[in-house]
């Protein structure tokens, strides 16, 4: 089973993601802001994948991804954002994310992105 870190500040989105991911992982970790995501990733070097919201309090998803890359350069990190403009996608990929998923998304889109990196 996968160990997935979900960095998402919105409670409804966290619930939705946990519902969608329950068939892939029984070991889901949740962070409510970017700084928590960094700390959880450091404490769990066996994380299989990270789903990272971009617009979060305390530390945004881009900065959190950069911090996580310092200690876990190979873990796949997928940017998950409501800001679905194409230039954002390119900027996020250039910043260092492995992939990008625009909200709202379907279960099949999410699972497709995750399975791409397994």
Image (spheres, rainbow, N blue to C red):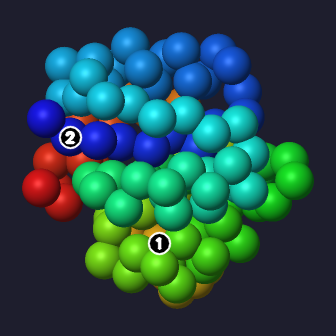
Q: Which residue is labeled 1 in the image? A: 97
Q: State the residue at coordinates (45%, 25%).
A: 17
Q: State the residue at coordinates (24%, 28%).
A: 25
Residue 100 seen in the current view: no
Measure the alpha-carbon separation of dots 1 and 2: 19 Å
> Are there few (<14), some (14-19), or many (20+) residues within 10 Å of tag 2?
some
Residue 55 seen in the current view: yes
Q: State the residue at coordinates (39%, 81%).
A: 73
Relative placement, left or right, of 73 versus 58 is left
Relative placement, left or right, of 13 versus 110 is right
Image coordinates of residue 59 in percent, x first then y, are: 81, 60
Which of the two discs, 1 and 2, sits closer to the camera? 2
Q: Which residue is labeled 2 in the image? A: 2
Q: Residue 82 carries which label?
A: none
Q: Within the image, what quadrant is residue 72 found in?
A: bottom left
Image coordinates of residue 50 in percent, x first then y, are: 42, 53
Q: Nearer the viewer, residue 100 or 47?
A: 47
Quadrant where the N terminus is found in the figure:
top left
């Amino acid at each position: 089973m996968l160990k997935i870190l979900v960095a998402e500040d919105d409670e409804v989105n966290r619930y939705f993601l946990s519902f969608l991911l329950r068939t892939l992982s029984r070991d889901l970790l949740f962070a409510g802001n970017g700084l928590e995501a960094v700390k959880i990733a450091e404490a769990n070097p066996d994380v299989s994948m990270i789903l990272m919201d971009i617009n979060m309090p305390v530390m945004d998803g881009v900065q959190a991804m950069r911090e996580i890359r310092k200690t876990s350069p190979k873990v796949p990190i997928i940017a998950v954002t409501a800001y679905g403009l194409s230039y954002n996608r390119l900027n996020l990929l250039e910043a260092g994310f492995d992939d990008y998923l625009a909200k709202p998304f379907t279960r099949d889109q999410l699972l497709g992105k995750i399975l791409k990196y397994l």
